[in-house]
Image (tube, helix red, strand yellow):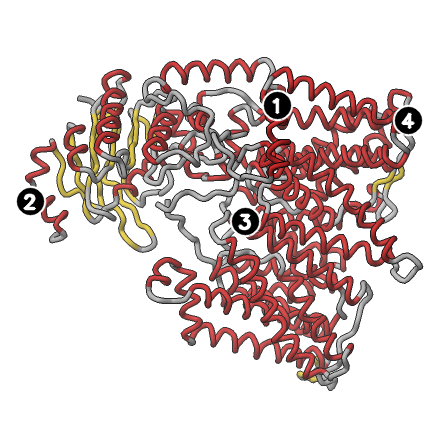
Amino acid sequence: MRAETDQNQQPGSPEAGAAGAVAKSILASAAGRAALWILLAAALAAFPKISSVYLLYMASLVAINVIATTGLNITVGYAGLLSIGHSAFIGVGAYASALLWLHAGTPLLVNVVAGAFAAFLVGLVFGVPSLRIKGVYLAIATLAAQYSLYFIFQQWVVVTGGDRGLSLPRTNLFGLGDVGFYYFVVGLAAVLCLAARNLFRTRIGRAFIAVRERDYAAEVLGINVVRYKLLAFGLGAAYAGVAGAMIGVFLRIVNPDQFTIIASIFFLAAVVVGGRASILGSILGAGFMTLMPELLRAVLDLVGGGGRLDIAIVLSPVRETIFGALIVGFLMFEPRGLAGIVDRLRGRSEIIDSRPEAA
Amino acid sequence: MAQFLEYSVIGIASGGVYVLAALGFVIIYKAGSVFNFAMGEMMMIGAYMFYAVGVNLDFGWLAGLLFAVIGSAVLAMAIERALLRPMIGKPVVVLVMITLGVGSMLRGAAGLIWGPSIVQLPEFLPRKPIFLGDILIPGKLAWGLLGVGALALAFVAYYRFSRAGIAIRAISSDQVTAAGLGINIGQVFSLTWAMGGVLAAAAGIVAGAVNGVTPQLGVVALDVLAVVMLAGMTSIEGVMVAGIFIGWLETMVGAYLGAAWQSFLPYLVVLLAMTVKPTGLFGEHRIERI
Amino acid sequence: MQDLLTIDRVSLELGGISALSEVSAGVAERHITALIGPNGAGKTCLFNVISGFYRPSAGAVTFDGIDLLATPPYARSGLGIARTFQNIALFSGLTVIENIKLGAHSQLRTNVFSAGLYFGWARREEATLDERIDREVIEFLDLGEVGDRSIAGLPYGLQKRVELARALVMRPRLLLLDEPVAGMNAAEKAAMAGYIRRCVTDWGTTVLLIDHDMETVMGLSGHVIVLNFGQVIAAGDPDAVRQHSGVIDAYLGVA
């Protein structure tokens, strides 16, 4: 949903203005946009040829996180529902898909769908009681989900392998090994982002936004608010399930410590930093949050070089502090996130946090 | 039978922690309608403040206690003033997300300053056990319970009878009219957060005194959540009853059904409360004016 | 003349106060009925009962023979009831045209899967809707150049017209207008009154409106219902109501 205004809301620096003008003219023409997409696709396709093993690994991880973040953005950004248990649903998808593979030997796509479906169903267990009521109850229910699902992952040893988790065999997609996985997950992320984007060209997406802003008015327009909230939340959980299935294949291991409250906050930060109610924002946010800890580790290595700092111990609390600071900082000072910054450079504006004029 | 009573007393005592934290929670919610997801971390920081002055700096437990109480109040007021007040008018989701972010920051900061290992708080509760007939109550527990009880009652008395308390209730009921009557909304917000901070610190210290302190101490907030859901987010009296009850229930479940069920209990209570009576047993149903 | 909407002894309690007491009224089909009264009389409360936000403690509301109170709020739109709000309930996260399209929500059939896919079914449905809105509503309300703009920058009078457009997309049988001309200048009021009249004559819509602008109200409506303190104190044609002593007292604050 992009709302155009006639004039620049935020006059930037001259350089940004000039760059904005050039970008605007390219983006204005359909041919220009098509060319950009082709360029992007080509770049993504060619990436494995020019990258190192490490970069390929990071790119695949970013793609997985893009899927998870996009799902969370549908729930939190577009529909305005706070979900604090996203990582637990990723875990459900991971375990469901891994278990299916290990016990039934089913093909990857089937496992992915199973993961999505399982996460969706589990999501409903927490969504149905909490979304019937107005208020912050979904946040509470998903917090409960986060801890209770972790508990189940850890304690149901017979099924989940407990703390040791599940080990998965190597996959060889398209016969290309890691590169094959990269193509698969990037393709999957692209399809899912496109699908999410499409939602907001239809009544489904419009309904999500209406429910977020003023649910009584939405109700009057014929939108079953509870049903649409459940749908938005369920979709987010389903996307999480897909991401979970992928992370299992990627890391070849599924264990409870991958799905903690810190991870849920990671994804919330990705949504907030990238830009709520924006597919581009989901991509930017996922990219930023995935790469940022790597940058952080590099910085800490530099600073703590010589063994003065025990990186392992320090990294986790530093990450927690930064995630929290990012959420607070962006909510207060850059509510439209990185996508909003991109929009500003392009000379457009979009309102997502507005309140109605006082009656 | 004696064992049942003994467990019961332990349960009630641990419920005391929940009562304090839940009171802090409710007072903040009543005035500002903000669900403070950083409550657990505020408890944790309160305990660490006590530790910092009492042990790190070795000034003794009294100084530690004082510092923790004042420090927590100041921290809470700072959070409200700097991060939440500017955001009034934004959708509630945004405010709640900010408290979530704050919680994460506090956890991270604590981990950086004090590390992940458990630390023990200085002994300040008398060790001498109390005997109720045949039942032995550990001294720390009994005195802890007394302290908690006193603080809770003092708080409720203040809330019920002081002008500040009336102001809080006025704002909770109808913010616009309250402002129109000359009540300084900003001051009341600061006050409620300060109170929340103090209560959180007290709860954190008692919890820490029993189990030691780590940056993960805030996880107990889930039990507090169960209490608040059961009682209703706006009921001061309700959370006192619910807190004791949940504490008691948890101990009972842990004693007779095992630790696994004990851990699971809060989630069950939360989901059940939400399904059956979302406004809680004693909460009020707030009508939205359209 | 058949009453499309019948309100039968509806009483409503809100926070301990009796917001509506035994309110009975009939809204004649294909006519414009006005609901007036001093501030706080309960007019918007009655609208909210019809919309389903408040549950009355007593009484019945019937729409075209259907028991409205037994119908969930989100299903009432599908029956052909549309509404505007006192404080303009437009969605700022959507453009003008997207807001208007929301009016047709209950008539569209796209589901999650066809929406995600988009190309094919959903796209066709959107295109048809686009075309219908252009043809029927945009022209009707003179909203030509506004389509892709964001709600935020729009002048007040224009926003009100967009909200009306959204209500009209579904060709409602009953249109509930809450203060349609509030805050408008004389020209805008006349224009809005014209649109409302044309809804009735061109599309056979039934209108129930609340407003404080007596000139507009009396000029538009064939039937006027007066509320005060949650009770009906007068009902009839504009001239009769205008001269009713109880009504005069109410407005002067004497009642």
What's the amino acid at mark 2?
Ser
Residue B190 visible in the picture: yes
Lower position in the chain sequence, tag 4 or tag 3? 3
Lower position in the chain sequence, tag 3 or tag 1? 1
Callout 1: helix, strand or loop?
Answer: helix
Identify the disc placed on residue C245. 2
Where does label 4 land, which residue? A177
Subunit that carries the residue with mark 4 = A
Where does label 1 land, which residue? A27
Subunit that carries the residue with mark 3 = A
Callout 3: helix, strand or loop?
Answer: loop
Residue drawn at x 50%, y 15% as measured from the top left: C127
Residue A121 visible in the picture: no
Where does label 3 land, which residue? A136
Q: Are marks 4 and 3 on the same chain?
A: yes
Q: Quadrant of residue C239?
A: top left
Callout 2: helix, strand or loop?
Answer: helix
Q: CA distance from mark 1 to mark 2?
A: 66 Å
Report the quarter where the N terminus of chain A lies.
top right
What's the amino acid at mark 1?
Leu
Q: Are marks 4 and 2 on the same chain?
A: no
